[in-house]
Image (spheres, rainbow, N blue to C red):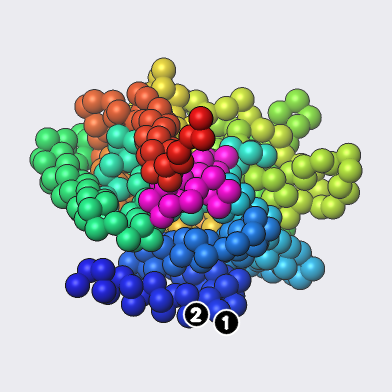
Amino acid sequence: MFQATWAKIYSWTLSLSTISPFWLSWVFGGLASLAMPPFQYWVLLPVAFSGFLILLENTKASKTAFWLGWVFGFGYFLGGLYWLGNGPRTLGMWLAVPFAAVGLPLCLSFFPAFVSLITFHYTKTPLARVFAFAALWSIFEWLRGHILTGLPWNLLGYTWDISVLQVTSLIGIYGLTVLTVLAACIFASRHKGWIVSVVLSMGLMGVWGDYRVTQGVGQVPAEGPGVNLRIVQASIPQQTKWLAEHFQENLERYIALSHLPAEKPLAAVIWPEASVTTLVEESPSLLKVLSEAAPPDGLVLFGAPREVEGKLRTSMMALDSQGRRVGVYDKAHLVPFGEYMPFRSILSFKKLTYGDRDYTPGPGIQTISIPGLPSVSPLICYEAIFPHMVVDGKNRPEWMLNITNDAWYGQTPGPYQHLQIVRVRAIEEGIPLVRSANNGISAVIDPFGRILYRLELDEIGFIDFTLPKRLSYVTLYQQWGDLLFAGILVVLLILAVAHRPYQKSNN
């Protein structure tokens, strides 16, 4: 029964590939992108990846294998990242739209192309091909997350729900990604034993994850005593956010939301990234106005640019109710082309964000102490997407604060993907994460990745909450980082070698 069913699927795939294997590969890549938020149709992953490996198995030339992988990658990255074109569109920079929406996927597609080429060249049996492809795909995903400042966005591990995501507390998102790719590819092996084993293992991971959340919530209090905070989401349109004639209007909206009555005394009010769009410290009168947004004897935390020794930085600042700056963090991991132009001596183009000056990175991720609040690791915008790079391991914070502005991307998958990514950081580190986004999705996430409260896209409002506690122990992933991920890769590569066809010696 099993073999007959698989034979039909196999022959159906081959019959489609006679039309155009490149077209079919592109469709498979596009189907794989639908596994990402907000859709999360993870059931399409076996169709996409196993289908692609069948095409690769029937490829005769290295050149064809390379371009099949490239086309698959283009379908995958175009479907998952097309929304980046909405960024320059909001500024009326129409010429930059195709470069953002299509140009980046075109470049990223070379990663799957090399995976496909190496897999084709070194494997000859279905099982060896599956093991090698899963390992190589994950290796190149790790490289994508580190080369040229890195872009570890939409790793395949992010397709799962909260139960399976719990395994990232052990092996991180790269570890879950390699297991996800293996599960998606294993059907191309046509090996009943391996298919059953891998599928059963993924199911057991979900059972364990559900148990971890259920038991852990009972052991760790959902809320810490007395630290009451407010997230303000003003949903300022990106087109008017930086315009001087709208500055007062935008500021008044933030202040009005901050002054609305609270059921419990607040320790701080949190505004998102670049909620103040001028150099605050150069204006004593503005400092006074901002301090009035703070609760009595409390704080206001907000994002704003600031100048340090003649260099422009994008920052998170904390003011007390007397207008004194009591904490500051400068963003360390800047967005290329968005906050600065790489190769400035060669490229004379303007960066996508407002202003003619490039931002300068701060000293790095750090735990800061702000009077009246537990120690915190601030993360501005996409700093939160980098696994094992969100907290100072030697000085672990009580919570993480991600202030961001996803208004660039409107009603697209981008903000949903961003939320899922930062949610996994909380699971990996065992530390709660508070997210304040200009237009959403703002959220309060506990150390198990549960979203306790949220404000949806373009919703104007606030969230009052009591800060969740971090786990009483340090997660395995926080201690070991990607070491276990590397171990999984080694095992898969050994299995790939072990399942090569045996060749008799002529001696």
Residue 123 location (% of width, % of height) = 50, 48
Residue 366 location (% of width, % of height) = 50, 26
Give the residue displayed 88% in from the left and 39% down from the top.
Answer: 345
Give the residue displayed 18% in from the left and 48% down from the top.
Answer: 204
> Does residue 474 appear anywhere in the picture?
yes
Neighbours of disc 2 within 10 Å: few (<14), some (14-19), many (20+): few
User: Is 232 on the left-hand or right-hand side of 67?
Assistant: left
The residue under label 2 is 16
Give the residue displayed 60% in from the left and 62% down from the top.
Answer: 60
Circles 2 and 1, Cβ within 8 Å, touching? The answer is: yes
> Does residue 382 appear anywhere in the picture?
no
Q: What element does badge 1 sit on?
A: loop
Residue 469 location (% of width, % of height) = 25, 35
In front of the other: 160 or 364 = 160
Magenta part of the protein: which range?
119-143
Q: Is residue 202 magenta?
A: no
Q: Which mark is residue 442?
A: none
Residue type, numbered disc 1: Ile
Work out whether 10 lies above or below 228. below
Give the residue displayed 48% in from the left and 51% down from the top.
Answer: 124
Q: Is residue 140 magenta?
A: yes
User: Is 366 on the left-hand or right-hand side of 93?
Assistant: left
In front of the other: 294 or 171 = 171
The residue under label 1 is 19
In front of the other: 463 or 507 = 507
Task: Tell me the quadrant of the picture where the N terminus can be found.
Answer: bottom left
| Magenta stretch, overall SS | helix
Work out whether 422 lies above or below 92. above
Calculate the distance from the C-alpha at mark 2 to the C-alpha at mark 1.
6 Å
